[in-house]
Structure formats: C-alpha cells, structure tokens
Image: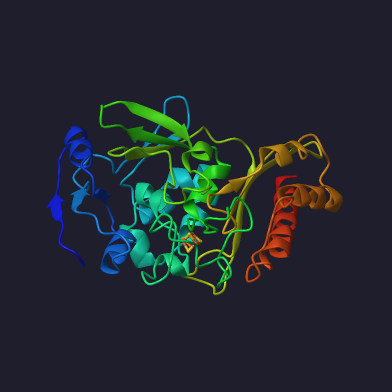
Amino acid sequence: MRPFDYVRPSGLPEATRQARAEGSAFIAGGTNLLDLMKLEVMAPTRLVDINRLDLAECASLPIGGLRIGALVTNSDLAADERVRRDYPLLSRALLAGASGQLRNKATTGGNLLQRTRCYYFYDTSAPCNKREPGSGCSAIGGATRLHAILGASDHCIATHPSDMAVAMQALDAGVEIETVEGITRSVPLSDFYRLPGDTPHIETVLEPGDLITGVVLPAPVKATQIYRKVRDRASYAFALVSAAAVVAVENGTIGSAALAFGGVAPRPWRNHHAELMLAGERPSEKLFEAFADEVLGEARGQGGNDFKIPLLRRTIIATLKQATEESQ
Ligand code: SF4
C-alpha cells in the first residue's frame, strides 16, 4: 500500500473541499476501497473519511417515500422496519449481498460506488482500460464468466456488482449529491451510471469532489416485489444474473411493471420500452417470453458468459410468473 494523507472532516463543505484535490477519495466503510488500495489498483493520495458527517439516518418524507442517508449501513437498511414493510425487495437484495460482517460496515453510498469484480481489474499485471485508460481489455478473449451481455463496449465488458442498486433501480430511486459549490442536486439512479463506451474509467456522473449524501425512494405503490438472484453458491457470491421486480396486477391485467437486472451489464439494467409491453396485458407465458426477448434483443455473449443469455431469459420469465401470481 502506498502512503496517503488522511483527513476526517466534520461538515459537508469541508468534506467536499478536501476531496476536490486531485488524487483524493472519500472513504466510509472501506469494504471495497481498502482492498483496492492494498492491491494498488487504486492509490489515492488523500483519504477523506466521511464517517463524522451527519448522514447515517433514514427519514420518512412528508410526501411519502424514504430518504436514506449515505452512511446508513447495509445491515441497518435491510433491517429498517419501513424498508421491510414498503420496499421488501430492497431488504432482500441487501441480505443477498456480501456477508453479515461486510454488511455491518458497507454503506449505502459506498455500495452504489463499489467497483467491478472483473478479475483483470484487480490484477495489476494485466491490461485494463478501466484501471489504466488506453491499456486494453484483458477480459475480451479471456475469462468472462462474470462479464456483461448488455451495455458493454469494445473497451470494457465489466459488470456492476451491486445487488442493492438493482433493487433501487426497480424502485425508481434518486441519488442525492452535494457538489463542491455547496449545491444539492438529485439524479435518477437510471441516469447515475455511465455506460463504458471508450471511457470505461468514468463510471458515474459524479464530478471531482461530489459526494453522495443520500438516496431517495419514492412513496411505495401497491405492488408485489420480488428479488431473485442466481449465483454460483448460496451466499457470499456476486450475481451471475439477478432480477428485481415491482409488479401490480389489477382485475386480471398487469397495471404496472418495473424490472431491473443485475450481473449482466455495466450498470443495473432496465428496459422501459420492454416494460410498456406488459402494461394492460393479461399475464401469460407468451407475454413473458416476448418481454424477455425484447430485453435480450441486443444481448451479446463473449464465450465464457454465453450461458447468461438463456439464464437471464429463464430468470425473467420465472420472476414475472411469480410476481403476477402473487399479485393477483
Ligand atoms: Fe478492465 Fe473492463 Fe476489461 Fe475488465 S472488462 S479488464 S474492467 S476494461
């Protein structure tokens, strides 16, 4: 690990000001960043510890909905009675991620910003455009079991590893950001992550010094919520494929449907166009198959991850079947 400065501000303005300097990085739980620093995948020259900031509360909003502070831990969020009652798929997704010890330290903001688990990203002897722009992508033509079938580019085929973000995507969450100028802005989670294109090292819309201060969930709707995760072992494993669904069936027809998918793309994947196919229709195997075909229309395997295309198709159909049956 390389030497670095360490500061622990007690207020937001100081935190964003300290993080403005080149080479700075925020640290909260540190469950991903410290590993990356030990491996010298990341080598920040200054760590800005935000644990003294007042961002560890969940607050019910007067208009309905929930504001989750960026420092709320994954364990506390999964156990929050409002989350368990109104957003059960978020609680399930959180509990499907990592281990109990990691969830006790990992925070809401940090979970959104965790880095890919692409093997080559962590191997500093391998070319990787995300770690070292312009060096190449070792995954293309290499081991691709964990890699993307949607949204990838010729420069990077990594997936985003979060379960929590997939659930939040289906719930239409917004990300609250404090800028270095002291301005608070809100970005829909669907616009927060950037696709890799030819700049896979730029993963989000955050500018230098920007700090995630919270996540806002809109008021809950009456619907069935499902989180389904397919992985290589029963716990402490990243998703090969996951699906989060918020589906409402009224009088035998689908009133609304929001579905997001994990383990298959550089960001939680959602296809609003495909969702329009479901609204107003009666649930049927044929409809679910057509929806899956639309979602997978541009899917492309890399050899080692070809299996994800039929796996996601089966997962989508099973998730929609369960959600619509439970919603009737
Ligand atoms: Fe790096 Fe992305 Fe290629 Fe993995 S897939 S080696 S993260 S550029």
On the image, the x and y values in percent for residue 241 come to 61, 61
Q: How is the image coloured?
A: rainbow
> Could you tell me which residue is drawn at 62 percent across and 37 percent down?
222
Q: Closer to the camera, 33 or 175?
A: 33
> Could you tell me which residue is drawn at 39 percent across and 68 percent down?
122
- Quarter of image, res 41: bottom left
Q: Quadrant of the N terminus?
A: bottom left
Horizontal relation, residue 286 to residue 116: left or right: right
Q: Residue furthest front?
A: 134
Placement of 210 over or under 299, stated as above or below? above
Placement of 181 over or under 91, stated as above or below? above
Horizontal relation, residue 289 to residue 81: left or right: right
Q: Say if residue 180 shows up in the picture.
A: yes
> Could you tell me which residue is drawn at 83 percent across and 47 percent down?
287
On the image, the x and y values in percent for residue 187 come to 45, 33
On the image, the x and y values in percent for residue 206 come to 38, 39
Q: Quadrant of the C terminus?
A: top right
> Could you tell me which residue is drawn at 34 percent across and 66 percent down?
101
Q: Closer to the camera, 18 or 132?
A: 132
Q: Say if residue 229 shows up in the picture.
A: no
Horizontal relation, residue 228 to residue 78: left or right: right
Q: Closer to the camera, 241 or 322?
A: 241
On the image, the x and y values in percent for residue 200 come to 47, 51
